[in-house]
Image (cartoon, rainbow, N blue to C red):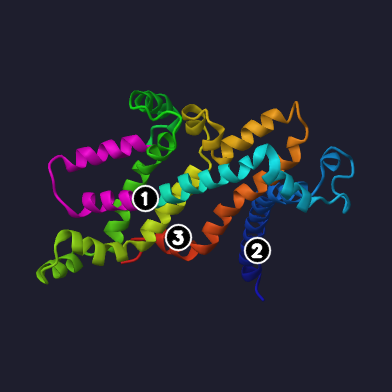
Amino acid sequence: MSAETLTAGRPRLLGRTVVNTVVGIAVLYTLLPVLWLVLAASKNRDALFSSNFFSLTDFSFAQNLRDLFAMDGGLYGRWYTNSLLYAVLGAAISALVSVACGYAFDKYRFAHKEKVFGLVLAAVMVPQTVLALPLYLMASATGLVDTLWAVFIPVLFNPFGVYLGRIFSQGYVPDEVLEAARMDGAGELTTYLRVSLRMLGPGVVTVFLFQLTAIWNNFFLPMVMLSDQKLYPVSLGLYTWNSSATVSPEYYPVVIMGSLLAVLPLILAFMLLQRFWKSGLTAGSVK
């Protein structure tokens, strides 16, 4: 083997080592909190604050699970149902609306189209916390404060999803296919529902996953809009329990167990829809 080959191989090997090290650190940084959460959820209250936290004793997973759903009259189950309603149904409707709007921006011509789309892009840069007060004032004026609609309606409209919908429409729906459908006598709505929407499936799933994560982790908007604990999502409910834990330590194990259960829907959604999401991320990359 020549010296040139050895010299060329060393930087390549060094580069792989650096990349693998960085990836390994990133994986540990991501997984260690989850591993701690799993271990903490299986411990009783005394073990959480003891020096033998990492020992293989004092397991109380089943009891913590029973206490979680029994605490405050089973309020956690209500919070979990609320989060599923807000996040799953809200993300599904939001994804369909966003992709339809993006499709319209891509395939149709109308007055001031690019200016309106520019407003959509500007809305992407507005933080959601900034919109909380205006949304509260609007909900107060219409009598929606402290109802599920005050949280559900705002999450149905996603400017970033509209932007992604236009990108997916450009990459997945050829104009020639639409012209062929129109020549066959299909109307615009029929063409969209039977032809375009099927092609936009990966885009719908991708927008759905982004919106599902955002709504499930949404905290500030429910805190502003809701005062009835029965309408809380999991994120806000666990926050109130965690605040009470400083006075009532019995809340600590149920907060940790509730946090563990709260991440499961997101993990499950990404696992089940991963193949659609991956294909959606490559939209338009290859002609």
Q: CA distance from mark 2 to mark 3?
A: 32 Å
Look at 72% across and 47% down and name the residue there.
37
Three-letter code for the amino acid on which mark 3 is drawn: Trp
Q: CA distance from mark 3 to mark 1?
A: 17 Å
| Circle 3 SS class | helix
Residue matched to label 2: 13
Three-letter code for the amino acid on which mark 2 is drawn: Leu
| Circle 1 SS class | helix
Task: Kindly check if marks 3 and 1 are in contact, taking CB atoms under 8 A apart as contact.
Answer: no
The numbered disc on residue 128 is: none
Which SS type dominates the magenta stretch? Answer: helix
Task: Kindly check if marks 2 and 1 are in contact, taking CB atoms under 8 A apart as contact.
Answer: no
Inspect the magenta stretch and tell me whether residue 136 lies in it.
no
Return the disc, 2 or 3, that comes first in the chain's sequence.
Answer: 2
The residue range painted magenta reads 96-124
Q: Nearer the viewer, residue 66 or 44?
A: 66
Three-letter code for the amino acid on which mark 1 is drawn: Ile
Give residue 89's position: percent from left, percent from top.
43, 50
Look at 36% across and 62% down and name the residue there.
201
Residue matched to label 3: 277
